[in-house]
Amino acid sequence: MKKNYLLLLCLICTVVTYGQDRSWVRINQVGYLPESIKVAVFISEKNSQDFSFTVKEATNNRTVLKGAGVAANAERWGMKQALRLPFSEIKKNGKYYVECNGVRSPVFEINENVYDGAADFILHYMRQQRCGYNPFLDTLCHQHDGYIVDHPTRTGEHIDVRGGWHDASDYLQYLPTSANATFQMLFAWQQTPDPTIFKDEYDAAGKKGANGIPDILDEARWGLDWMIRMNPDSALMFNQIADDRDHANFRNPAHDQVDYGYGPGTGRPVYPVTGKPQGLREHKNRSTGVSSSAAKYASAFALGATIFKEIDPAMAQLLQEKTAPAYSYAEAIPGNNQTACTVSPYFYEEDNWVDDMELAAATKYTVTQDEKWLKKADYWGQLEEVTPWMELGRARHYQFYPFINLGHYYLARSENQTVGEKYTNYMKKGLELLKKRADEYSDPFLNGVPFIWCSNNLVTAAVTHSMLYNEVSGDATFLEMEAALRDWLFGCNPWGTSMICGYPEKADFPAYPHAYISEVLHVIPEGGLVDGPIYKSTYESLLGIHLSREDTYAPFQFGAAVYHDDSGDYSSNEPTMDGTASLSYLLSTLEKRGKK
């Protein structure tokens, strides 16, 4: 809705450069809380021996700080010079800019309220992604879903699985990402049950108007209702609606005419959780069991039952009844259950599953304090001390998912001191590995995250992991890295762009995301977190990518990763539903800190 024209975007966000246009100062465009760590980053195609910088008040150009930058590895981002410019000692509310070697940053604000409304802002995108009834379009879609496939006795049978969210800019729907999104929103509310942060401005259908329930819980319930339909009884559990035949063109979901063999727009395939390699044609996934999907059901059902106990007792009871069978199913056929593809070799390659078992058991322990669940959670948790992408620095597409293990956090908070210390140390180990990689790169942005497809989801996971570790341990070792990764999402990155569509309002953010809302309706999909920077080699290997306009970030495409604000680049500039939902805890915690 806001910045539909690139020219306007550039005019708003371009820095003042005083005679040179090949150097830049990157900052968090949202702004900074007074007590937070604050570091800008200077990058330049030229080398200078002058490391000095100043911070000035924007209203009168008065210098409030003089400092010396800290040199970092400029070559990592295709530059000749890179400096980290720390200014954490400035705590006074106001508007400022950073100047280094004649280059100014955009103006930013220091204030307790800079993150106000952020946690609810991302819900705009979640409502845009709703399937069945879409409140953003005020229309119905996919009303014929769906027809069971790949089942020994029920293939071809119709089943009502309407609802849920479209996964991204396509209309596929996946249990793994939807269950994670649901859990992430429930978790954010569990940690911050504050109606001044999570407001009530929309009803259960996602239409404007309060209904007495915080909007984040309305959104989480939308996911839970769909998951109940996708798990109609203990003997049947579904993992996916539609497949990659969906990838036809940008279109309004209400007018989706893709033909899966039932007639144009008259129903889509529904894939059951089988625990076996799956795919209707030559391309198959590598599933070995059901645990990764069944345990995700169990986790979301268990947490949902607790949170909705007072809001809707009947629903909470149903969720409670479904939790144990889902967990038992996950235990009975151990292994990973991946998504299915048909016409292309791309699918969510989730290989790990013990983390899902741990989270399901840890959630039950957290809400019941039953020692048997603590023992189960501890058994699974010890099998994966560190989320593998943090340790390995690599991963295939969604190979290690979810990208954060919230089960470790629950166990780190255990009243059992031995268990608590063990999982606090596990959390610390993951951050140590991430920091070690960033230090080895001497990255000016302190970013040791691998730039796989959907790297922004990994950044979000790393920030969340660090915030939770600091909460349980009080250890400040990783706070600078945490702040750097937080700021990366909001513009302190080589491209100088926020990674959230439409946020903050007067900033450089994705104006041409790979989204039907942008391409068909010509509006910004507000609140959506885009995939983010990706290794150039990966980008160049993907099928169907093409840039549709001049690359305004061309000077910054010679480093560790590339990013394009272009609808033709689905690998770096597509908003995703699960990545967006995973911002819930991060943004609500920042907002809460400001209110304190």
Image (cartoon, rainbow, N blue to C red):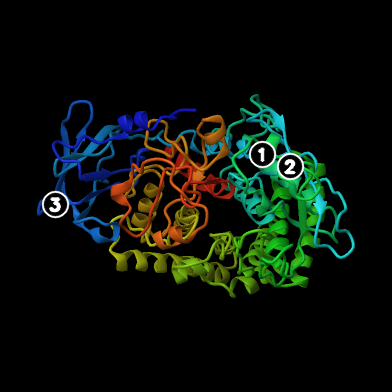
Q: Which residue is mark 2?
A: 163
> Looking at the image, is 173 positioned above or below residue 2?
below
* Residue 53 locus on image (x, y percent): 16, 45
Q: Secondary structure at mark 2?
A: loop
The residue under label 3 is which amino acid type? Phe
In 3D space, how far apart are the residues under numbered discs 1 and 2 (Cα atoms)? 7 Å
Label 3: how many residues lie within 10 Å, few (<14), some (14-19) or many (20+)? some
Left or right placement of residue 566 versus residue 256 in this view: left
Mark 1 or mark 2, earlier in chain: 1
Q: Which residue is mark 3?
A: 51
Left or right placement of residue 74 versus residue 552 in this view: left
- What label does residue 130 carry, if any? 1
The quadrant of the picture occupied by the C terminus is: top left
Residue at horizontal 29 percent and vertical 57 percent from the top: 77
Residue at horizontal 37 percent and vertical 57 percent from the top: 561
Q: Nearer the viewer, mark 2 or mark 3?
A: 2
Does the CB distance between marks 1 and 2 fall below 8 Å? yes
* Residue 520 locus on image (x, y percent): 56, 33
